[in-house]
Image: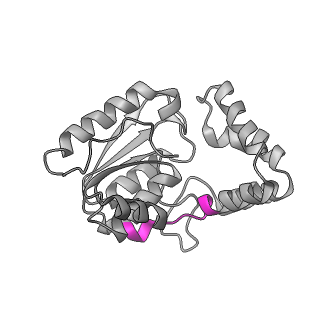
Amino acid sequence: ADDVIALLDALDVRDAVFVGHSMSAAIGVMVRATAPERVGALALLAATPRYDDAADGTYRGAFRPAELAEALALLDRDVAAWAGGVLPTLLGETTPRATVLALATQLRGMRPDIARDTARAIFGTDVRTLLGAIDCPTLVLHADGDPTEPDHVRRWLTDALPHATHRVIQGAGHLPHVTHAEAVAAALDAFIDTVSSSVGHAAAPPTAPPAD
């Protein structure tokens, strides 16, 4: 989040529409909470405020803590085994096998320590306490086949955000911008059209895929 804010500061971007996927969606929340003048609207794709259940029982995530601990322990022992076993489950059954294999190959090519540190940073994310302060238009773009964002998590996230609307991408897993690009682009275009009258832009919204 600090790096994104530094970039927006350097470019003097104000009221941007921040589009973030997965971990980058959480980063978008952090950026808006820290530098609200830089982000005027959020589009959160395949987002979750926290991956596992809270220890105090106040939140039910997509995974039990023991499940995440087991997955991370496997990653500590064998990155290749994690890429071949856990990654397909996280991406969802509807993600094409070719896409899963390509990502698994990329993961196997990473330095093991970087892969482990990245995974722990992602799965340790918890932005629940920030959501009530996100007082800008927010789109929650939910893929109905995404194991990391089951429907109860999507409802919790949407309810916690003061100005959230949600759209469902049917038949998509955790990578809807890859597997259902046209549906995602249409939802983003509609959202940007809706907020463009109330949000000023330093430049036209980019047409590149959402941050991952």
The quarter of the picture where residue 146 lies is top right
Q: How is the image coloured?
A: one colour
The residue sitting at the right extreme is 77
Q: Give me the residue at 72% from left, 31% from top.
A: 101
The residue range painted magenta reads 121-130
Q: Give me the residue at 30% from left, 57% from top.
A: 13
Residue 63 drawn above or below residue 127:
above
Q: Image check: 175 left or right of 137?
A: right
Q: How many marks?
A: 0
Residue 108 drawn above or below residue 129:
above
The quarter of the picture where residue 86 lies is top right
Whether residue 99 appears in magenta in the rendering, the answer is: no
| Residue closer to the observer: 104 or 67 | 104
The residue sitting at the bottom extreme is 56
The quarter of the picture where residue 131 lies is bottom left
| Residue closer to the observer: 91 or 10 | 10
Whether residue 125 appears in magenta in the rendering, the answer is: yes
Q: Give me the residue at 47% from left, 64% from top.
A: 1
The residue sitting at the front extreme is 10
Q: Image check: 92 left or right of 185?
A: right
Q: Image check: 194 left or right of 9?
A: left
Q: Image check: 162 left or right of 3?
A: left
Q: Give me the residue at 85% from left, 51% from top.
A: 78
| Residue closer to the observer: 167 or 182 | 182
Residue 63 percent coordinates (x, y): 61, 55
The residue sitting at the left extreme is 197
Residue 149 percent coordinates (x, y): 51, 47
Majority secondary structure of magenta residues: helix
Residue 147 percent coordinates (x, y): 57, 43
Residue 60 percent coordinates (x, y): 52, 60
